[in-house]
Image (cartoon, rainbow, N blue to C red):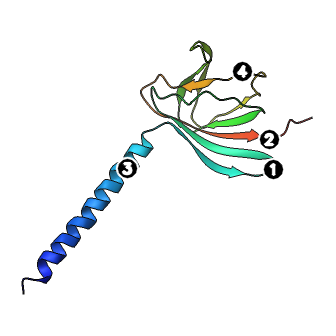
């Protein structure tokens, strides 16, 4: 009975190849700077930011204040569109921070110049508080 064995070997090889490819794709995805949405309603938006070394977040702005909880230690530079560092934050794992709304018309990028990923949870309000 030589028929089923080659088919089984081909099937096993195909499944293993697919699993290996999926693992590589997941590792590549995990190695990029990104925002992962966590929760959103009419009052707030919550996301996890993962800022990889030397992979800044794109230029963006925050219309409203936000709370941030550092999941890792890290130093983050805030850079304006001209590439000038306008602020530097030193996050401590497990600590919470408050960041106000960005000045009108200004954008920034978040840059991680360290050797380790920086991970934070951000809770951004959608409305100004009185």
Relative side of 40 to 54, left or right: right
Tell me the CA gap for discs 2 and 4: 18 Å
Q: Residue at x 17, y 77 (%)?
A: 7
Q: Which mark is residue 106?
A: 4
Query: Which quadrant is the N terminus positioned in?
Result: bottom left
* Residue 127 % position (x, y): 84, 39
Whole-angstrom CA distance, mark 1 to mark 3, is: 34 Å
Q: Residue furthest left?
A: 2
Q: Where is residue 126 in the image (x, y as percent from the top left)?
A: 80, 41
Q: In this view, does 90 lie to the left or right of 117?
A: right
Mark 1 vs 4: CB contact within 8 A: no
- The quarter of the picture where residue 2 lies is bottom left
Q: Which residue is drawn at 44% across and 44% down?
A: 30
Dot 3, how many residues are within 10 Å of its Cα: few (below 14), some (14-19), or many (20+)?
A: few
Mark 3 / mark 4, whichever is N-terminal: 3
SS under mark 4 = loop
Q: Which of marks 2 and 1 is nearer the N terminus?
A: 1
Mark 1 lies on a secondary structure that is loop
Classify 34 as above or below 42: above
Residue lying at the far bottom in this picture: please name it: 1
Quadrant for residue 86, please give it: top right
As displayed, is residue 125 above or below residue 21?
A: above
- Label 2: state its secondary structure: loop
Q: Do residues under tags 2 and 1 come within 8 Å of each other at their CB atoms?
A: yes
Residue drawn at point x = 60 percent, y = 38 percent: 94
Q: Mark 1 points at which residue?
A: 42
Q: Look at the numbered discs 3 and 4 and tell me whether their residues touch, using CB distance below 8 Å.
A: no
**Residue under circle 3?**
25
- Circle 2 residue: 126
- Which quadrant: the C terminus? top right
The residue closer to the viewer here, 54 or 96, is: 54
């Amino acid at each position: 009975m030589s028929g089923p064995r080659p088919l089984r070997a081909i099937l096993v090889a195909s499944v293993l190849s697919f699993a290996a490819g999926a693992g590589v794709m997941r590792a590549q995805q995990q190695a990029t700077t990104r925002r992962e949405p966590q929760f959103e309603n009419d009052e707030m938006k919550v996301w996890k930011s993962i800022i990889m070394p030397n992979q800044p977040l794109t230029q963006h702005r925050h219309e409203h204040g936000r709370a941030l909880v550092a999941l890792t230690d890290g130093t983050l530079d805030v850079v304006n569109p001209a590439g000038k560092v306008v602020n530097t934050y030193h996050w401590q794992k497990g600590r919470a921070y408050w960041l106000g709304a960005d000045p009108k018309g200004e954008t920034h990028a978040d840059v991680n110049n360290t050797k380790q990923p920086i991970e934070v949870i951000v809770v951004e309000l959608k409305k100004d508080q009185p």
